[in-house]
Image: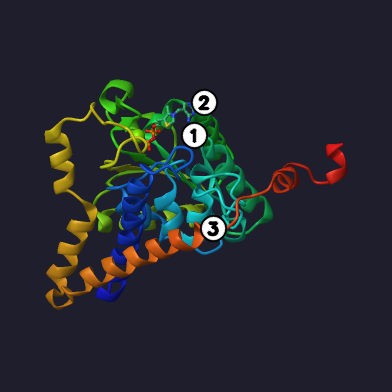
Amino acid sequence: MSVKVMLDNWKLMSLIREFDLYVKEFAKSDDAVGYLHTSIGQEASSVGIIKQLRADDWMTSTYRNHSHGVARGLDVYKMVAELLGRSTGYCKGLGGSMHIADQDINFIGSMGIVAGGIPIATGAAWGSKMRGNDQIALCFFGEGAIHQGAFHEGLEFAIKFEAPVLFVCENNLYAESTSSKYHLLHESTIGYVEPFDIKAIKVDGNDFEAVEAAAKECIDYIRKNKKPAFIESMTYKLSGQYEGDTETYKSAEEVAYWKSRDPLKSYKSRILEIDPSVESQFEIFEKENKQHIVDAFARASKDPFPTVEDMHNAVYLDKGVRA
Ligand SMILES: Cc1ncc(C[n+]2csc(CCOP(=O)(O)OP(=O)(O)O)c2C)c(N)n1
Ligand SMILES: [Mg+2]
């Protein structure tokens, strides 16, 4: 891996971080509408996996979707406009932060419903297989989604009918305020897929290179064998469940431990180990990214809100149906 590519990866992770840091502050303002979920600390998992996709592959995300959207190359300004409920947003301002989607690049949905994206991605993968092409589908979900019927439906269907889908469980140790130690039947979510014939890898989701290697291995396997695979990406959200969460269920020691494993810091150290001469780059990237986000918010906040007419048009195909 060249240092140039590694720096690109870091820059993308930093863009996600700056996006979410801005959102964290913005959430405290009166302009914030709806729930806002950030992924601070989970950036290596998002970028390490999504970067291995091909441009025409499908993917679904969850309500914790800013990281996935930015990593997939969505337009930050249009994401922000959606978050602000403006008509220039990805869903014309009718979906909000949790429902960002871009059909043009096969980012086919972010789901507010836990595990909701799993059968949708499985269907997209199955569709590719029926059409005889080699596109694959990726779906992200949290470890809380493991308990949903939709996870088991999607998984079983993909295994039985050999749908080329990559299931990625981002295990960030909590489902809302409930610890995974308490709610998981197995020590790891891999335990849930072990009884099936499916390739599965557990990876340190804060180690960019480990995530990248696991994703490459699984995606190559899926494309070649036309079969699904499963990754458990072990990570931690340094932010709360949603913005405004008081996070009283986390201990100070636990948070300090995971801060010391911040993926941006460790990947930066790794890059500097290889090439110490690029030290000054990181601050420049951070500054550029911060500005990019500030500009996106400034521009989008001047945009119009959707009208009632826009809402009707999004629901009904023919205006006449409204009568
Ligand atoms: C079907 C359904 N049940 C409950 C909720 C409420 N809810 C929102 S997030 C969440 C926790 C999910 O945790 P996890 O899957 O671990 O993802 P994380 O938020 O940690 O990324 C719950 C229960 C929901 N959105 N959908
Ligand atoms: Mg979780």
Asked whether disc 3 touches disc 2, contact meaning CB atoms under 8 Å apart, the reply is no
Q: Secondary structure at mark 2?
A: helix
Count of all numbered marks drawn on residues in the image: 3
Instruction: Pinpoint residue 295: horizontal percent, then vertical percent.
Output: 42, 65
Label at residue 305: none
Q: Secondary structure at mark 1?
A: loop
Image side of residue 87 versus residue 40, left or right: right
Q: Residue at x 27, y 43 (%)?
A: 235
- State the CA–CA distance, disc 3 to disc 2: 25 Å
Residue depth check, mark 3 versus mark 1: number of the one nearer the observer: 1
Image side of residue 141 versus residue 25, left or right: right
- State the CA–CA distance, disc 3 to disc 1: 20 Å
Asked whether disc 3 touches disc 1, contact meaning CB atoms under 8 Å apart, the reply is no
Which amino acid does the dot numbered 1 rest on? Answer: Ala
**219 to 259, vertically: above or below:** below
Image side of residue 317 versus residue 311, left or right: right
Label at residue 115: 1
62 vs 294, nearest the viewer: 294
Instruction: Tell me where residue 38 sits by quadrant.
Output: top left
Label at residue 57: 3
Instruction: Pinpoint residue 71: horizontal percent, then vertical percent.
Output: 41, 58
Asked whether disc 1 touches disc 2, contact meaning CB atoms under 8 Å apart, the reply is yes
- State the CA–CA distance, disc 1 to disc 2: 8 Å
Q: Is residue 269 visible?
A: yes
> Label 2 neighbourhood size at 10 Å, few (<14), some (14-19), many (20+)?
few
Q: Is residue 59 visible?
A: no
